[in-house]
């Protein structure tokens, strides 16, 4: 109640709380002979404060998490100092977000709670019950989630937007060993190994070769590969049916890579001779590394918007008339230049160029996908107005390289983000007024 009195005055939150606490103490003193301290400030952060009760609550929560993880917790003094530093950092970021107008809608918090419950294999109701059983309240949980989301938005907006990855950095990464692995497909393999020692005689090598030929014959007759691996393989994976699991193709020996190059899922390789002996590989599955073919459309349209002179019905009728004229032989390009209200494409005869999925709004893309080549669509509506649309060409384009470069770009950005974030956090702390009381 005391705090509410200060809302109409232009004073800082710190001043308001400190004065309120003083008034509370005075009121308590007048009512009781013994003055009882309700709470105290442990840090001032610009115009904000951190209270001792908050520090204690967070310390208990962090200590419990450390204990549950099986890690040895530091002494209480050290832990409190660490927690206080975290609270100060959070205050600085939350105030930046608040001043920038960042607010988290209730719907987004609800969705986050649903994800948290699912990650713990709980229903939302069970998750809420678990929170209450721990002595916490959902209002506190919701505020923590909102604060975390605000800080993420502040970090992304302040740090990430200033990170740039140039073409040379991208090319250097893609040409590195890590970049090669990133573009390499994953393969799920089985192996049968017939060992041959380096000192084996010609007769021993011949016996091993005959054994392998016999195994190949049984495979061709339908005998299960895993069954044969268990019975015959000298590899340590024998008892698992020769299953090597998922491997990066680029990490396999060159002999294996060459043998797998043209195999399809379910096929067996030709026998492979290595220093360890003879190998048979079975390719169970393969993922990644293939061409990423995406259908593109070359389209053009005419856009009209209802106005005070021409209502919606008249707009649709006008577009239908244009559609009829095009069907009778008039030039789409000329009509688009004369009538389209999409200034960006009208001068080019309504041409939109080659498009990829996700470039246009849903209604536009659905129409573009559904009409035949050179057909002029019926009028349809988007948030921009009413359109007629024509697709003049379609093609399947390989975007493997673009997708790979985007993945690499995102990876490098995340790495730089981790480095730059710490620099930025230290910078905003250095620029802030921070006073830490004795704790």
Image (cartoon, rainbow, N blue to C red):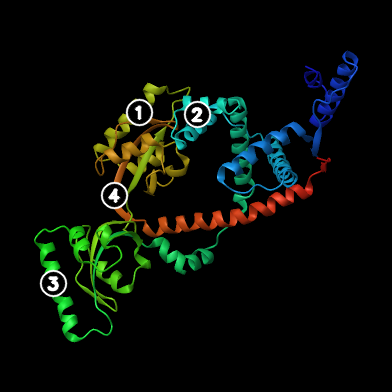
Q: Vertical placement of 183 versus 361: above or below?
A: below
Q: Percent from the top left, x then y, of residue 375?
A: 25, 40
Determine which residue is flagged by label 2: 127
Tell me how far mark 3 sits from mark 2, CA to CA.
59 Å
How dense is the environment of label 2, judged by Cα within 10 Å: few (below 14), some, or many (20 and up)?
some
Badge 2 marks a residue whose secondary structure is: helix
Would residue 240 be found to the left or right of residue 169 on screen? Answer: left
Q: Vertical placement of 409 versus 374: above or below?
A: below
* Residues under numbered marks 1 and 4 in contact, where contact means CB atoms less than 8 Å apart: no
* Residues under numbered marks 3 and 2 in contact, where contact means CB atoms less than 8 Å apart: no
Q: Quadrant of residue 303?
A: top left
Badge 1 marks a residue whose secondary structure is: helix
Marker disc for residue 213: 3
Determine which residue is flagged by label 1: 318
- Front disc: 3 or 1: 3
Would residue 341 be found to the left or right of residue 194 on screen? Answer: right
- Give whichever of discs 3 and 4 has the lower sequence position: 3
- Front disc: 4 or 2: 2
Determine which residue is flagged by label 4: 393
- Give whichever of discs 3 and 2 has the lower sequence position: 2
Q: Percent from the top left, x then y, of residue 63?
A: 64, 41
């Amino acid at each position: 109640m005391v705090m509410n009195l200060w809302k109409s005055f232009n004073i800082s939150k710190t001043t308001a709380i400190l004065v309120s606490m003083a008034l509370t103490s005075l009121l308590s003193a007048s009512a009781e002979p013994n003055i009882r301290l309700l709470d105290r400030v442990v840090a001032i952060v610009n115009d904000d404060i951190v209270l001792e009760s908050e520090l204690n609550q967070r310390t208990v929560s962090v200590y419990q998490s450390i204990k549950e993880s099986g890690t040895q917790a530091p002494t209480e003094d050290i832990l409190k100092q660490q927690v206080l530093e975290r609270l100060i950092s959070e205050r600085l970021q939350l105030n930046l977000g608040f001043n920038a107008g960042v607010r988290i809608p209730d719907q987004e918090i609800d969705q986050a709670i649903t994800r948290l419950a699912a990650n713990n294999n709980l229903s939302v109701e069970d998750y809420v019950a678990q929170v209450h059983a721990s002595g916490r309240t959902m209002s506190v949980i919701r505020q923590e989630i909102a604060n975390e989301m605000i800080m993420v938005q502040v970090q992304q907006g302040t740090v990430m937007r200033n990170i740039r990855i140039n073409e040379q950095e991208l090319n250097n990464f893609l040409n590195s060993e890590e970049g090669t692995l990133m573009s390499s497909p994953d393969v799920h393999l089985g192996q049968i190994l017939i060992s041959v020692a380096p000192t084996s005689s010609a007769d021993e090598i011949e016996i091993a070769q005959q054994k392998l030929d016999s195994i190949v014959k049984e495979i061709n007759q339908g005998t299960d590969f895993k069954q044969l691996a268990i019975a015959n393989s000298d590899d340590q994976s024998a008892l698992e049916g020769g299953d090597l699991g998922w491997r990066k193709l680029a990490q396999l020996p060159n002999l294996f890579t060459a043998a797998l190059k043209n195999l399809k899922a379910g096929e067996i390789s030709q026998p492979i001779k290595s220093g360890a002996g003879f190998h048979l590989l079975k390719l169970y599955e393969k993922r990644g590394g293939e061409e990423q073919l995406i259908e593109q459309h070359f389209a053009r349209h005419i856009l009209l918007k209802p106005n005070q002179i021409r209502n919606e019905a008249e707009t649709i009728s006008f577009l239908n008339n244009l559609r009829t004229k095009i069907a009778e032989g008039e030039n789409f390009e000329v009509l688009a230049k004369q009538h389209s209200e999409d200034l960006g494409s009208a001068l080019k005869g309504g041409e939109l160029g080659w498009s990829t999925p996700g470039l246009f709004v849903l209604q536009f893309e659905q129409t573009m996908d559904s009409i035949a080549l050179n057909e002029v669509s019926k009028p349809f509506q988007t948030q921009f107005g009413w359109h007629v649309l024509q697709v003049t060409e379609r093609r399947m384009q390989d975007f493997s390289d673009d997708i790979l470069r985007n993945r690499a770009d995102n990876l490098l950005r995340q790495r730089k983000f981790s480095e730059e974030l710490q620099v930025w956090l230290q910078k905003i702390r250095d620029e802030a007024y921070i006073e830490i009381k004795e704790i």
